[in-house]
Image (cartoon, rainbow, N blue to C red):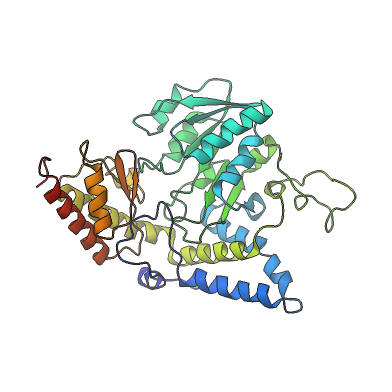
């Protein structure tokens, strides 16, 4: 795909105004829709010789992920979602794994289920700095039994962008596991310092559900046992029949069966589109939108609990209204057609590069309605 300007990229999407929930699901654009149509047509017609090309999307996926992460082609394997990639990693580990209990359940469930099933992985629960994992608070919580540290690139609750370089320096030669879903494709992260990276394409990549990858450093391959390794993950020529050969070496060992070829194709198409416009370009536009949302929240004295500094944030703004006012705020957003995630005592707003002025105007109108309906607050 040739290079794209940010305006050309934006023109390829058509979500309705008011959508501020990309941290939950990213609506797909024209490129992905066209890829689905093209590949589905091949699948429907099954013209002689056409299905081989459809079923052989692995190298395309590897190249697309490699372009955004710096991992080699042989270090990358397609996964249907982040959770399955992290399950592969955690079930393959032996020893202590340090992580926060407040991480997204993809990480915590993988660690606990592995410990329960195999008894060789031991989760060690980290204390956080108000939900943040930093090099400083991590350093004193590590001991000799810890062989790996698992973090999210961007925390789904707080919107905090983790310092991967700083964490690598603190943990030494331990494996660094990263759930990159909440920042992959919009954060220019130093993935090369990580050993295990898993991400899905349904959020910021805008490829839809059923898409993702697992990337493993050479060191990770040496340490991990491919527990879930199916018949597509051997060195046998063709399908292994009447025998069960050992898993292949490398990331390819961490797959169970043939993937959904249409899902692979749309994931690759979305990643190629991201590469064409550039992660830094997307990040810059999203940073502007995040700043505008913070400014609007400040205008109505709504407490912003997510990071304000660009170096500590990605695409998430978290609001925490006064006790008893969450329902009023959620209703105001709903009544003005603003899509957001309401969880616990917070509202999470997450714009993309395609978020327009009409959406921001709808957000401002919802805040105005909230301030009118909540006279007991300190809102203006």
Query: Residue 323: horizontal and vertical position, in percent?
Result: 22, 35
Residue name at image x 52 percent, y 38 percent = 107
Q: Is residue 189 left or right of residue 238?
A: left
Judge whether residue 1 can be spotted in this image.
no
Rendered position, 86 above or below 16: above
Query: Residue 284: horizontal and vertical position, in percent?
Result: 34, 58
Which residue extends farthest right? Answer: 242
Query: Residue 175: horizontal and vertical position, in percent?
Result: 58, 34
Rendered position, 211 above or below 356: above
Residue name at image x 49 percent, y 35 percent = 168
Q: Is residue 190 left or right of residue 146?
A: left
Residue name at image x 66 percent, y 75 percent = 44
Query: Residue 291: horizontal and vertical position, in percent?
Result: 25, 53
Residue name at image x 46 percent, y 61 percent = 206
The foreground one among 171 and 45 is 45
- Total labels: the figure holds 0
Judge whether residue 263 can be spotted in this image.
yes
The foreground one among 254 and 258 is 258
Name which quarter of the figure residue 48 lies in: bottom right
The foreground one among 21 and 273 is 21
Rendered position, 176 above or below 71: above
């Amino acid at each position: 795909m040739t290079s794209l300007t940010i305006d050309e990229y934006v023109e390829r999407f058509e979500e309705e105004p008011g959508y501020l929930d990309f941290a939950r699901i990213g609506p797909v654009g024209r490129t992905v829709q066209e890829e689905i149509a093209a590949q589905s047509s091949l699948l429907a017609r099954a013209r002689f010789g056409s299905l081989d090309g459809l079923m052989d999307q692995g190298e395309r996926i590897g190249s697309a992920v490699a372009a955004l992460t710096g991992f080699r082609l042989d270090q990358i394997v397609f996964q249907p979602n982040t959770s399955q990639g992290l399950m592969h990693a955690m079930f393959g580990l032996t020893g202590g794994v340090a992580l926060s209990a407040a991480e997204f359940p993809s990480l915590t469930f993988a660690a606990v289920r592995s410990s329960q099933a195999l008894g060789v992985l031991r989760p060690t629960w980290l204390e956080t700095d108000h939900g943040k994992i930093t090099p400083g608070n991590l350093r004193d919580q590590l001991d000799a039994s810890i062989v790996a540290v698992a973090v999210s690139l961007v925390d789904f609750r707080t919107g905090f962008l983790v310092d991967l370089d700083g964490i690598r320096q603190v943990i030494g030669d331990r494996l660094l596991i990263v759930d990159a879903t909440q920042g992959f494709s919009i954060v220019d992260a130093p993935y090369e310092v990580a050993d295990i990276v898993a991400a899905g394409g349904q959020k910021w990549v805008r490829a839809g559900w059923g898409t993702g990858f697992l990337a493993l450093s050479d060191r990770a391959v040496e340490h991990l046992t491919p527990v879930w390794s199916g018949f597509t993950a051997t060195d046998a020529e063709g399908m292994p029949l009447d025998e069960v050969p050992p898993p292949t070496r490398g990331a390819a060992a961490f797959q169970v069966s043939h993937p959904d070829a249409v899902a692979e194709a749309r994931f690759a198409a979305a990643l190629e589109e991201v590469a064409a416009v550039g992660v830094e370009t997307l990040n810059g536009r999203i940073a502007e939108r995040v700043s505008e949302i913070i400014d609007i929240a400040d205008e109505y004295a709504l407490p912003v609990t997510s990071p304000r500094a660009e170096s500590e944030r990605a695409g998430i703004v978290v609001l925490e209204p006064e006790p008893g006012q969450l329902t009023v705020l959620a209703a105001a957003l709903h009544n003005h057609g603003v899509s957001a995630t309401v969880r616990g005592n917070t509202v999470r707003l997450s714009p993309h590069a395609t978020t327009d002025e009409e959406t921001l105007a709808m957000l401002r109108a919802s805040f105005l309605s909230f301030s009118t309906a909540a006279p007991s607050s300190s809102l203006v």
